[in-house]
Image (spheres, grey):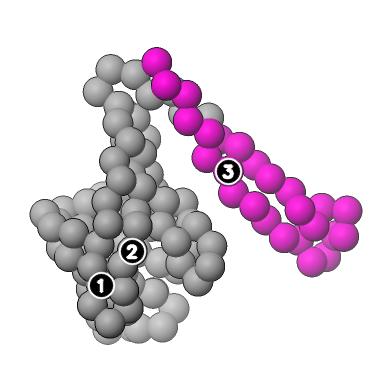
Amino acid sequence: MLRVLVLAGFSIAASPALADVSIGVGLTLSGDAEIKNATYDCGAAGKLAVQYLNAVPNFLALIPIKDQTLVFVNTLSASGAKYESGQYVWWSKGKEASLYDEMKDADARPILTCTE
């Protein structure tokens, strides 16, 4: 059995005492659980390393965006695997994947298109 700890750092400007708070979320990986590392070629944007943590019923993707790693959670999709984190959506199907910024594009065009 492998135990994984996902850490997320938060900066809270309103309270200096809580400026560097870390929160840990433990997932126990056993049975069919897996950690998958994938590297995507995103053309002119370069390479993108994504780590998938699959431990039923939790399916997560750790994706570096703007000098920080965001935790994406798998959500319902009609096709492929759709992950969301705040304003971002990571949608993959087969070897193709796209990153969307819901705050920047109301027409649902990807800000990044990649191939594994």
Q: Please tell me how crowded label 1 is: few (under 14), some (14-19), or many (20+) other residues with Cα within 10 Å.
A: some
User: Which badge, 1 or 3, comes first in the chain's sequence?
Assistant: 3
Seen at 87% across and 60% down, the residue is 16
- Boundaries of the magenta span: 1-25
Residue 85: quadrant of the picture: bottom left
The local secondary structure at tag 3 comes to strand
User: Which badge, 2 or 1, comes first in the chain's sequence?
Assistant: 1
CB atoms at circles 2 and 1 under 8 Å apart? yes
Tag 2: amino acid: Leu
| Residue 75 image point, x, y percent | 31, 50
In the image, 66 versus 83, the foreground residue is 66
Q: Nearer the viewer, mark 1 or mark 3?
A: 1
Tag 3: amino acid: Leu
- Above-or-below relation of 13 to 45: above
- Above-or-below relation of 86 to 103: above
- Gap in Å between the C-alphas at discs 2 and 1? 7 Å
Question: Which label belongs to residue 7?
Answer: 3
Q: Which residue is mark 1?
A: 42
Q: Please tell me how crowded label 3 is: few (under 14), some (14-19), or many (20+) other residues with Cα within 10 Å.
A: some
- Gap in Å between the C-alphas at discs 1 and 3? 26 Å
Q: Quadrant of the N terminus?
A: top left
Tag 1: amino acid: Cys
Q: Which residue is mark 2?
A: 48
In the image, 103 versus 11, the foreground residue is 11
Q: Quadrant of the C terminus?
A: bottom left
Question: Which label belongs to residue 116?
Answer: none
